[in-house]
Amino acid sequence: MTIIDIQDVSFKYKDEFILQNLTFQDDEPMIIGVWGRNGSGKTTLMKLMSGQEYQNSGRISILGHNPYNNGKAMKEITYMRENHYFAKSWNVNDAIKFASMFNEYWNQDEADYLIDLFELPRKKKIKQFSKGMQSMLQSVIGLASHAPVTMLDEPTNGLDAYMRKLFIQALRKSFEDDPRYIMIASHHIREIEQICEKLVVISNKQVKLHEPIEYFQTRGAVLVGKLENINQVVTNKDIIEETKIMNQYKVMVDVEYADELKQKCQSLNVKVDKASIQDYLVNMTVTKEANHE
Ligand SMILES: Nc1ncnc2c1ncn2[C@@H]1O[C@H](COP(=O)(O)OP(=O)(O)OP(=O)(O)O)[C@@H](O)[C@H]1O
């Protein structure tokens, strides 16, 4: 069954399009990352998918439901936004009790396990929590909800390296125990790479890439050498960034980092390395659009 089916969705605030003709579909439970630059529309996409906003045009179907204003769909969807609102007087126990009442698939054992794992004080007021502690509590609720479609917006915001590691372990375990569709918006591509099966890249108001993580692990190369030699390996349209260092050229190209490329480069005395996923995505969503249009 199709879990996520988003067809030609456009959304604008006032007169400005934030998303325009955005389309993607997923049919399997998975942990999926959403990556995009600041303001690219990740949060907006999640709000649309969780029925908190309504698109100007196009169609959104989540497990067969149109999510907007749809109580039936809300039972299947959890969206934990950044800086989730908690009542001023609440402590962890209050927030968990409230969440347990409104989530159809709530798993109290998992909530208790995660609160202990993340060492969250149960009786301290949430408004006195640090940013990282509040993020952790949001993740506890998001994961313990066990909603068939769970969306976490920047769940590692404010977490230190150790807490990020704990969160990733907890997310993996939760998914293994109960495979479902878990979408994570994050700027931290290293985290996404460790845990996500697929990645949606939003750029220019659309889904630019929607590929398994392996695609990004083998895509993008950095070539250094004489320009005339580089030009024999790649074409101009492959180049997503170029710099000149002394009399050498350094280019990043949107091609597969494969044996054929490596052999060609070697025969022409061009040095070749895999581009980091971070640099590749930044160039795919910044330089190419800004400089090559
Ligand atoms: N309530 C609003 N009214 C008007 N414009 C808005 C509103 N909320 C968001 N926007 C605009 O929509 C665009 C997309 O914002 P969104 O929060 O979806 O991006 P994002 O990818 O989640 O960003 P970030 O990575 O910085 O969190 C931005 O240009 C933002 O200014």
Image (cartoon, rainbow, N blue to C red):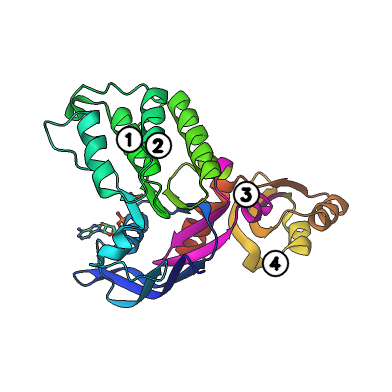
Across and down, in percent, residue 84 comes to 24, 43
Q: Which of 66 and 167 is in front in this view?
A: 66
How many numbered marks are there?
Answer: 4
Tell whether label 1 touches label 4 (CB within 8 Å).
Answer: no
**Closer to the camera: disc 4 or disc 1?**
1
Mark 3 or 1: in front is 1
Query: In the rendered structure, does residue 60 fall within the stretch colored magenta?
Result: no
Would you say residue 197 sits in the magenta stretch? yes
Q: Is mark 3 within 8 Å of ligand 1?
A: no
Q: Do the residues labelled 2 and 1 touch (CB within 8 Å)?
A: yes
Query: Which residue is located at x 75 percent, y 53 percent?
Result: 226
Task: Identify the residue at horizontal 35%, vertical 61% (top origin).
Answer: 45
Residue at label 4? 235
Q: In which quarter of the image is ligand 1?
A: bottom left
Name the residue beneath numbered marker 3.
244
Real-space Cα separation, disc 4 to disc 1, in angstroms: 45 Å
Calculate the distance from the C-alpha at mark 2 to the C-alpha at mark 4: 39 Å
Image quarter for residue 77?
bottom left
Q: Which residue is drawn at 32% across and 35% down?
A: 135
Mark number, residue 135: 1
Q: Along the polypeptide, which appears first: circle 2 or circle 4? A: 2
* Mark 4, secondary structure of its residue: loop
Q: Give the residue at mark 2.
A: 156
Pointer 1 local density, CA inside 10 Å: few below 14, some 14–19, many at least 20: many
Q: How far apart are marks 2 and 1 (CA)?
A: 7 Å
